[in-house]
Image (cartoon, helix red, strand yellow):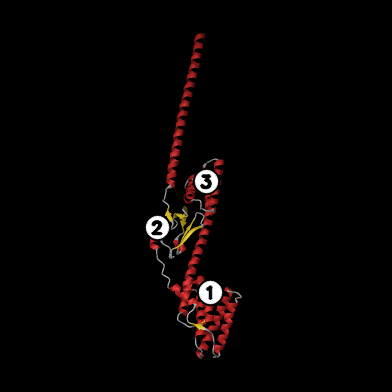
Amino acid sequence: KQHPAKVVLSKLLMLGECWDQRSGNLARKLLDGIKLVLIQLNQKGANPRLYEQAANRIISLERAFGEYRTERLKKIVEEKRTEEREAKADLFVSDFIRNKTQGEEFPVFLLEFMENYLTSYLKKVFMETGPVGQKWHNAIEDTENLIWSLNTYYSAVYVEQYNEKVPTSLKRLYENLDQMFPNSEGLQGFFYDLEEIHIKKLAGERTDYHTILTSPLLEELESQESAPQPNNYDDALEQILEDDDWYYLIQKGKRFRCQLVPREYTGKWLVFTNLSGALIADFDIYSASFHPGHLPIVPIDTHNYWEELTEYLERTMQRRVNLLKEQEEKLQQSIAADKARKEAAEEAARRVIRERIEEEQ
C-alpha cells in the first residue's frame, strides 16, 4: 500500500503533466479542489492520519472528475459516429437510388418526391438500423413497390400483383413519412396525385404525366460516383500516433496539450481533447486535403517526473537527516558538558566537606 503522501504527490504529478492554459473549467475545478485540500492539510499539520484523509478526498475528487470527463468524451464519440453513419447513409442511399433511376424514364412528380422526401426517409432509417434491419428492408420494399406501380404497364397480372403488395406498402410509407414531415402539403399532394394515377391505371385508363430520363437528382448522384476514392493513411498514422497519448497541438503559433481519443471509437476522425475532455481539434482523415505530414501536432517527450521528484525528496530528506544528526551531536556534547560540570561541582562539594571534617578533628 502506498503512503498517503505519495498518493497525494502522484495525483499532483498526473495533473501537472497534462495541464496548460486550455485545460478547461472542469480541470480547473479539480485543481481548485486539490488546492483547498492541501491548504487545509497545511493548516492542521501533517501527520499520517491527516495525509490519509487528504489522499482519500483527492481520490474522490479525481473519481468525480473522471466520470464527468468520460461523459464528455462519450458525447464527442457519439457525434463523430453519427457523422460517419450519416456519410455511410448518404452513400448507401445514393447507390440504391442510382440503381433504380439510372437509364430509366421516370415521372417527374415521382423524382421530385424522391428528392424532397424519400431520400431523407431512407437515410434516417439506414442510420437507425443499418442495411440489415427489418425497418430498412420494409423501406426498400415499399420504395420498390412504389416505383413498380408506376413503371409497370397495365395488365391482369399487374392488377393482381398491385392488390397483393402495393396498398400495404403505400400505407406504411405514408405513415412513416408523415411522422417525419407532419402536415406537409407537398407530401399529401404527391399521394393524392398517386392515388388518382393508380385508380386510372387499375381501370385500364390512360395515365398522363410528364416523364424525363435524367434529373438533377441523378446528375448529383453521378457526380458523387465520379468522386475520387480517399487515400488510406492508416499505416502512416500508426507510425506517428498512439491512442490516449498526449501531444502538443500547434494553433496560431501557440501549442496546447491535448490527448488523442482512441481511433477505434472515432472512425475516420482524429479527435484531440484537453484535460477536461472538451474538443480541441478534429481531422477527417478521408478528406482530400488531409495528409499525416500536415498534422499540426508535436509529440511530448516523456519525462519521469516521479523519479525526479523522488530524487529531490531523497536529497531534501538527506539534508534533513544530516541536520538532525548534527543537532543530535550538539545535544550529546551539551549533555556531556553538563554532566562534566555537574560531576565537577559534586567533587568540589565533597572536597569542602572533607576539609571541614578534618578541621574539626
Q: Earlier in the sequence, mark 2 or mark 3?
A: 3
Q: Position of residue 203 (x, y in %)?
A: 56, 90
Real-space CA distance between mark 2 and mark 1, rounded to the nearest whole angstrom: 41 Å
- Secondary structure found at label 3: helix
Label 2 neighbour load within 10 Å: few <14, some 14-19, many 20+:
few
The one nearer the camera, 286 or 209, is 209
- Which residue bears the numbered disc 3? 52
Could you say which quadrant of the image residue 196 lies in? bottom right
Q: Is residue 231 above or below residue 165?
A: above
In the image shown, does 165 or 353 lie closer to the viewer?
165
For label 1, count other residues whose C-alpha is less than 10 Å away and answer few (under 14), some (14-19) or many (20+): some
Percent of width and height locating residue 306: 44, 46
Q: CA distance from mark 3 to mark 1?
A: 59 Å
Mark 2 or mark 3, whichever is nearer to me: 2
Please, what is the three-letter code of the amino acid marked with disc 3?
Glu
Amino acid type of the residue that numbered disc 1 sits on in the rendered structure: Tyr
Q: Are marks 2 and 3 in contact (CB under 8 Å)?
A: no
Q: Could one spot residue 190 in this view of the protein?
A: yes
Decide: is 216 above or below 60.
below
Q: Is residue 263 above or below residue 165?
A: above
Q: Earlier in the sequence, mark 2 or mark 1?
A: 1
| Mark closer to the observer (3, 1) | 1
Q: Which residue is mark 1?
A: 121
Question: x and y percent of residue 321 in the render?
Answer: 45, 36
x%, y% of residue 279?
A: 50, 58
Query: Which residue is labeled 2 in the image?
Result: 240
Q: Secondary structure at mark 2?
A: helix
- The kind of residue tagged 2 is Ile
* Mark sitting earlier along the chain (3/1): 3
Residue appearing at x 45%, y 75% in the figure: 222
- Circles 3 and 1 in contact, beta carbons < 8 Å: no
